[in-house]
Image: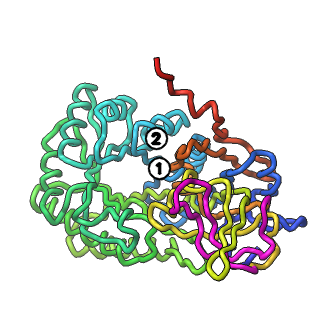
Amino acid sequence: MPHTLKDVLPVTARVNDAGHLEVGGCDTCDLAAEFGTPLYVFDEATFRTRARELRGAFPEASLYFAAKACPALAVLQLAAAEGLGVDVASAGEMHAALAARVPPARMTLHGNNKADADIVRAVAVGLGRIAVDNFDDIDRVAAAAAEAGRRQAILLRVTPGVEAHTHTHIQTGQADSKFGLSIEAGLAMSGVERADAYDTLDLVGIHAHIGSNIFSYDPFGKTVEILFDFLADVEKVLGLTVEEVNLGGGLGIPYVAGDFPIRLDLLAKLIAETAEQEAARHAIPVPRLAFEPGRFLVGNAMVTLYSVGVVKEIPGMRTYVSVDGGMSDNIRPALYQARYAALLANKALEEPGRTVTVAGMHCESGDILVRDVGLPASVRRGDVLAVPATGAYGYSMASNYNRQPRSAVVLVRDGAAHTIVRRESLEDLLRLESPLP
């Protein structure tokens, strides 16, 4: 296994005596033979390690797992077991978290266009936070709380005007965003006034998520400065002290060799020092901080396994290595040109000998999983190809494009593998459909 891939693989990854990639004490080639491919392999130890690193860096903060990254029941249970709350962004994610017995008081409901039924359920089951995204949200949450005869804690989602240096599809903190109320345009202040006018709402904090897979410290520091300016204005204009600031998630992870993501200890130091400095400058109390990472916790915990099929060489141009999955199990490369590494799990000790492009099996020219990656020169049909760092948004964004059954997810721990999501069958693909009458 190339040493350069160490940082992108699960913490338990190693090459065993057979020369195969091993994760969680399980030979990945054996997993591919037993469970079939494509196969998502989720390493429990990596998730727990990341959760503990997060708690160690921010011991006083409220910490949540962003379910959208990987909302499998077992993963949600792991989050709760590690002392994390869960942030949900849909009826389905809320339903899954409740089914996983995540305490409702440790859940936050997000969304820029929440259904009435979702708001009513969130209030009824006692969700700890509802992040109101717009004026309509404020009114509807207040009405649902009044109907339920309770007072609902809310966060006001604001856009601080910070453009994180990441792909435009995953930037969310700029002023022109479908999410939140703009501070610069005065909408956020109006939102605070509107929320404060309702007896059934308890505005406990503000929320700002500036984007995903961020590798720079500066946007986080700048966001804290802008949010504290806003908190000071709220206290000055309305006489309200905001007790909580949720900075969302967005921490980048290593996907390929040479990626240098943010160090948690340095980020924690920057945020703490900036918060103290800004609070002192404005003479306001330092609010409780909260974070909602998703990718950081699950991204490097998963490896996707494929079976190699056709190897097509175009002389003087390119070699395509086609696999039995693709954009139906990992849409990110097609959606926003995400980069990945790859290796042959059954030839993990062989050095790369040729540069190839890993292609998916779907009827789209854009179904390319990994461009220009080094694989052993001996790559051929039947090899097991492993793509690391697929834990975030692989399973959760999977589809049935080309009527491809969605892949199984197996959790590995101490040499044992457990199916946590079974593979769909061809019959499953038609279970909701009816023929013409």
**Quadrant housing residue 367:** bottom right
Q: Which residue is mark 2?
A: 93
Return the residue found at the far top. Answer: 437
Q: Position of residue 433 (x, y in %)?
A: 50, 27
Q: Is label 1 in contact with label 2 (beta carbons under 8 Å)?
A: yes
Q: Which residue is mark 1?
A: 68
Q: Position of residue 114 (x, y in %)?
A: 30, 40
Rendered view: 282 above or below 292:
below
**Quadrant housing residue 167:** bottom left
Q: CA distance from mark 1 to mark 2?
A: 7 Å
What amino acid is at disc 1?
Lys
The residue positioned 43% from the left and 43% from the top of the image is 107
Q: What colour scheme does the image use?
A: rainbow
**Quadrant housing residue 74:** top right
Q: Position of residue 26 (x, y in %)?
A: 80, 55
Assign a secondary structure to mark 2.
helix
Q: Which mark is residue 405?
A: none
Return the residue found at the far front. Answer: 315
Q: Residues within 10 Å of mark 1 (few under 14, many from 20)?
A: many
Relative horizontal placement of residue 127, taking residue 374 as reference (left or right):
left
- Asked whether residue 412 is drawn in magenta, I would say no
Relative horizontal placement of residue 230, taking residue 71 as reference (left or right):
left
Rendered view: 248 above or below 421:
below
- Asked whether residue 356 is drawn in magenta, I would say yes
Relative horizontal placement of residue 160, taking residue 236 as reference (left or right):
right
Q: Position of residue 38 (x, y in %)?
A: 68, 51
Rendered view: 221 above or below 95:
below
Q: Which residues are magenta?
A: 353-382
The residue positioned 66% from the left and 44% from the top of the image is 408
The residue positioned 41% from the left and 36% from the top of the image is 91
What amino acid is at disc 2?
Glu
